Image (tube, helix red, strand yellow):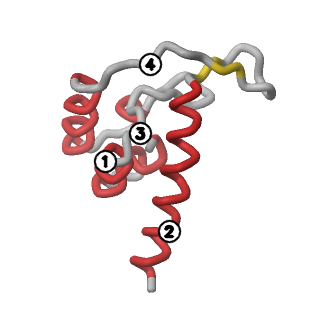
C-alpha cells in the first residue's frame, strides 16, 4: 500500500483496502502510506480507512529484525493481498 500511495495509484490503494489491508502499517523508516503520499485523493481515502479500522492486538516478532513487531493477522493479510494484487495487475496488463 505504501508503494501504491507514494506513486499516486488511488485504485490500488482502494483495492488493498477492500481486501482489508491495514493503512497504518509502517515501512522500514517508520512511515505509513499516508505519510508517503502527496495525493490529496489518496490522503482522504486513507484517513477514512484509518478512522473506520479496528486494531488487532496479537503480535508476531519478525525473525529478521527483533525490534519490529507486526500483528499476525496483518502479516497474513499482506501476504494474501499482495498475491491478489499481483494477479489483478497481470490481468489488466493483458
Earlier residue among tags 2 and 1: 1
Residue 78 image label = none
Real-space Cα separation, disc 1 to disc 3, in angstroms = 7 Å
Q: Judge left or right: residue 92 versus residue 41.
A: right
Quarter occupied by residue 75: top right
Earlier residue among tags 3 and 4: 3
Q: Which residue is mark 2?
A: 87
Q: Considering depth in this image, is 93 or 76 the residue closer to the camera? A: 76
Real-space Cα separation, disc 4 to disc 1, in angstroms = 17 Å
Earlier residue among tags 4 and 2: 4
Q: Which quadrant would the C terminus be assigned to in this image? A: bottom left
Q: Which residue is mark 4?
A: 56
Residue 18 image label = 1
- The relative height of residue 13 versus residue 51 in the rendered view (above or below) is below
Crowding near pointer 2: few (<14 within 10 Å), some, many (20+)?
few
Q: Considering depth in this image, is 2 or 70 the residue closer to the camera? A: 70
Real-space Cα separation, disc 3 to disc 2, in angstroms = 16 Å
Q: Residue drawn 29% across and 49% down?
A: 14
Q: Secondary structure at mark 1?
A: helix
Q: Residue drawn 71% across and 14% down?
A: 67
Q: Which residue is mark 3?
A: 21
Q: Which quadrant would the N terminus be assigned to in this image? A: top left
Q: Secondary structure at mark 4?
A: loop
Real-space Cα separation, disc 2 to disc 1, in angstroms = 15 Å
Q: Secondary structure at mark 2?
A: helix
Real-space Cα separation, disc 3 to disc 4, in angstroms = 12 Å
Q: Nearer the viewer, mark 4 or mark 2?
A: 4
Amino acid at each position: 500500500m505504501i508503494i501504491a500511495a507514494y506513486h499516486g495509484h488511488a485504485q490500488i490503494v482502494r483495492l488493498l483496502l477492500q481486501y482489508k489491508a491495514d493503512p497504518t502499517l509502517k515501512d522500514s523508516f517508520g512511515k505509513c502510506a499516508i505519510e508517503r503520499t502527496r495525493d490529496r485523493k489518496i490522503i482522504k481515502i486513507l484517513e477514512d480507512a484509518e478512522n473506520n479500522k479496528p486494531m488487532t492486538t496479537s503480535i508476531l516478532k519478525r525473525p529478521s529484525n527483533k525490534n519490529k513487531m507486526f500483528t499476525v493477522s496483518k502479516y497474513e493479510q499482506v501476504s494474501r493481498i499482495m498475491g491478489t494484487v499481483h494477479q489483478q495487475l497481470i490481468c489488466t496488463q493483458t
